[in-house]
Image (tube, coloured by chain):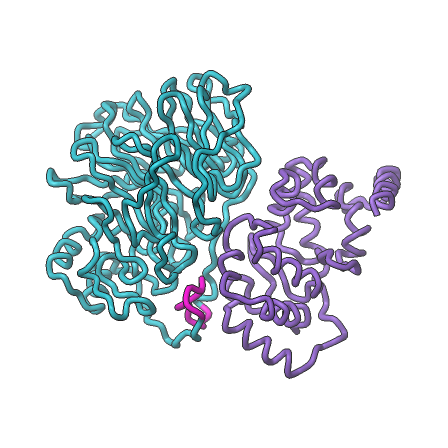
Chain colours: A cyan, B purple
Amino acid sequence: MAYRTDFLRRTALAGFVGLIAITASAQEQQPAAPQQPQAQAPQPLPPGSALAGRPDNPEAAKLAPVSSPPLPTPADKLPTAKLKVPPGFSVEVYAAGVGNARSLREGAKGTVFVGSRTLDKVYAITPTDHKVKVIASGLHRPNGVAFKDGTLYIAELSQISKIENIEDNLDNPAKPTVIYDDLPKDEAHGWKFISIGPDNKLYIPIGQPGNNEPRDPKHAQIRRINLDGSGAEVVAIGVRNTVGFDWSPTSKELYFTDNGRDWMSEDVPEDKLNRLTKVGEDFGVPYCYQGNISDPEFGWGHSCTDYTPPVALMGAHTATLGMRFYTGSMFPAEYKDAIFVARHGSWNRSKKLGGDVVVVKLNKDGSVKSVTPFLTGFIADNNYLGRPVDVQPLKDGSLLVSDDWNGAVYRVTYKGKAK
Amino acid sequence: MKKALLSLLAVSALAGTAYAAVPEKAEQCPACHGENGQSQTEEIPSLGGQQPAYTLIQLYMFREKLRTSERMSPIAQDLTDDDLHSLSDFIATLPKPKPPADAGDPARMAAAKGLVDKEHCNSCHGADFSGRDNIPRIANQREDYLLKTLRDYKSNKRAGYDASMAEVLNSITDTQIVELAYYVARVR
């Protein structure tokens, strides 16, 4: 199954696309998914309402955000046997009992750090026996973790903190020290993925504080700071909610996922994979979604041609989250410098979409060649058996995948030529 | 209050098997939440018919100090994971709260219904406000508790398990909150 990179390239070049063309393309790609035009005009809501655009009909009323349970699933009840990977690969449980496991990061000594969103904890999984230890608690939505030179960086809802020499002190870690807190306190899209770039700066996303909000200078952007918290600078704007990014090992350019808005329709807008080629680029939100749809509420007076289009569309409402470039040597050569992307799975769609890990392969010029499923099987009978949040290649070349639905981390390995 | 609760705990510990079907630790609930989960106490919610996934999350949050309450926090400290399951499953079997005798002022109810419709409260809580999964039943909940809850979500004094309520309340005024609570408490 290839997503619409060809279509996207065409439309990006054409510069203008009507809604009819988009609909036609969506049908080409997913013939089974019926188009559901809004039968009734929604009642007007104030700008920025979470439910703006939601039609009053029984099918729409069935959809509501799904929260992961707080208690982790016991190891023997995890859906591992139902998960599917390409031939030659296998998937196993790396660690269970990691409540609400979200962002992943590997330390220099092989410790795996895991953030959480609905809980208050950051975990460490020890390298040899995969023991799960709580290394920080009492935090507010500590979703993001980053690691550099022995120091763990933690992103809570509205502050960034650090713990030095963390891997030498997993049993008695110091309390996190705040390095940066000039951040909004909005709950909606306030949780953060963080990562440290090749420029040695810490990148921090600030989500749009709701489903579809008017633009303001403090939200819907990516900032970067020095590792001591100084020198904050905005590097991208018009970014609704990115919960995953990484830098190309070859071009050093930043690639990041972004989640499209809710309630526009079943099939649009799609989530995006974006590429930042220069500081300050504008990715269009809330005026333009998926690179070619003018927002019905905020798009008036703006044109999608004024914003940087995505390099790939990642499916409607799929909640495309964590991503990493793969530079390891365990997987076959075709995966070299490809991007693994976790799609958490949709809620704002009648037939669930996403809930998997896909692999994005790039052309030499950094454009997208293909988007194909890699780890699937998390959806059965339109219900979640698990929900992937982040991916982390380990030094040995295997790939970890976090699942906040079950509070677990899986490991994908390649064992040889089964083809 | 605390003393009354402690003595109730002592009594229920002694009574032990008097209510075989009721989880032992549920015997302390009625002191504040009322018989059969129908609260008669100011700002204390009725529990009857509550969605088990929601109750489990709340008990978990009290235990882990993600949600604080002078009364609930100490009680929740003793709950095991199994207790969380058995208590929330048991609470779901209690009768749902009945609409109050006071049907409300018809004009005020009609205006409030317009607001409820406009804000799509039914989008997650359901057409009859009985909730689903992690989304709570709110129909005929105590008005003072609804009012307090909505205000606490809006001010972020009560951080939700997820961000949903903080998000939807962002554009709702306190005057409107008063009307939402008035309506949902009396809806029939």
What percent of the width, then of the height, locates residue A135? 52, 26
Q: Is residue A404 visible?
A: no
Q: Main secondary structure of the magenta part?
A: loop
Above or below, B93 against B9 in this view is below
Q: Is residue A382 visible?
A: yes
Magenta stretch, residue numbers: A46-58
Above or below, B113 against B98 in this view is below
- The answer to if B18 sits in the magenta stretch is no
What percent of the width, then of the height, locates residue A78? 47, 35
Can you name the residue that lies furthest to the front here?
A231
Classify residue A28 as left or right of residue A145: left
Q: Nearer the viewer, residue A215 or A256?
A: A215
Can you name the residue that lies furthest to the bottom here?
B107
- The answer to if A47 sits in the magenta stretch is yes
What percent of the width, then of the height, locates residue B36? 77, 56
Q: Quadrant of the C terminus of chain B?
A: bottom right
Q: Nearer the viewer, residue A367 or A61?
A: A367
Classify residue A6 as left or right of residue A409: left
Where residue B61 sits, quadrant-wise, is top right
Above or below, A302 against B56 in this view is below
What percent of the width, then of the height, locates residue A372? 24, 43
Task: Give the total number of marks visible in the rendering.
Answer: 0
Where residue B15 sits, quadrant-wise, is top right
Residue at left offset 53%, top offset 34%: A121
Classify residue A366 as left or right of residue A378: left
